[in-house]
Image (cartoon, rainbow, N blue to C red):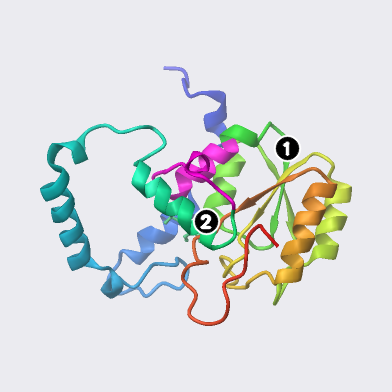
Amino acid sequence: MQNKFAERARLVKSSETREILKVTERPEVISFAGGLPAPELFPVENLKNACNAVLDEEGAASLQYGTTEGYIPLREAISQRMKDIGINSTIENVLITSGSQQAIDLTGRLFINEGDTIICESPTYLAAINVFKSYDAKFVEVVMDDDGMVMEELEKKLQKHPNTKFIYTIPDFQNPTGRTLKLERRKRMIELANQYDVLIVEDNPYGAVRFAGEELPSETF
Ligand SMILES: Cc1ncc(COP(=O)(O)O)c(C=O)c1O
């Protein structure tokens, strides 16, 4: 039988993340390659209690189909959290996804045309690169120092690549470097994005897991 896969499937390569996770499943391996949460910190009892409470209180309704955008009280809680960190959003701006991979995939599907450039930190999150590659994006990397992406370099890249669609950035405890973008650079990134008419896609899984120091704002200054 002839290869029946869609054209775009040729862009989907085997995932390095999956290969890394395969190795971490071997009991003798302590892997520093994949960022796995410490299993002893998983709140197993709390989750059990939460599940029981939902089933006791909501019964069958909790297992029924819901709206595509997600459970409204959860969207309200997220919208409130966004407001608390200075992002002016309402629940219309919140969409619940099955983890970040789905969110990143939807972002790629919505914004990337074949050959568009994405500017990212060097190095950046492997799993996001793989998704954006599947939409035929080109990558341009910007060097970092201890305070995150270097803005002079970002500006040079924006000048050089006028077909940039967005800057993909992990400003808080960046993966894999752990660096946090300092406040003045956040302001500068927004200025540059406006000046060069590109979007900023902020991936922020770790901002709320801060053990010391002040949380830095995302949007409103
Ligand atoms: C930058 C970044 N985004 C997203 C994720 C994963 O998020 P999720 O658990 O929602 O898939 C990670 C986890 O390693 C990450 O480092």
Q: Amino acid at mark 2?
A: Met
Quadrant of res 98: top left
Mark sitting earlier along the chain (1/2)? 2
Q: Which mark is residue 162?
A: none
Q: Amino acid at mark 1?
A: Asp
Asked if one can make out residue 125 in the rendered structure from this viewpoint, the answer is yes
Mark 1 nearby-residue class (10 Å; few <14, some 14–19, many ≥20): some
- Placement of the N terminus among the 4 image quadrants: top left
Drawn side of residue 196 relative to residue 13, left or right: right
Pick whichever, 149 or 16, lies toward us: 149
Drawn side of residue 142 relative to residue 50, left or right: right
Q: Which mark is residue 116?
A: 1
Residue that carries the numbered disc 2 in the rendered image: 82
Mark 2 nearby-residue class (10 Å; few <14, some 14–19, many ≥20): some
What is the span of residues highlighted in magenta in the rendered image? Answer: 88-108
Which residue is at a point 46% across and 18% down the rendered structure image? 2
Label 1 sits on a secondary structure element that is loop
Quadrant of res 172: bottom right
Please determine whether, in this image, residue 152 is positioned above or below residue 12.
below
Q: Position of residue 206 (x, y in %)?
A: 50, 66
Q: Position of residue 202 (x, y in %)?
A: 61, 54
The prevailing secondary structure element of the residues shown in magenta is helix
Label 2 sits on a secondary structure element that is helix
Which callout, 1 or 2, points to the residue nearer the camera?
2
Pick whichever, 185 or 157, lies toward us: 185
Specify whether residue 204 is painted magenta: no
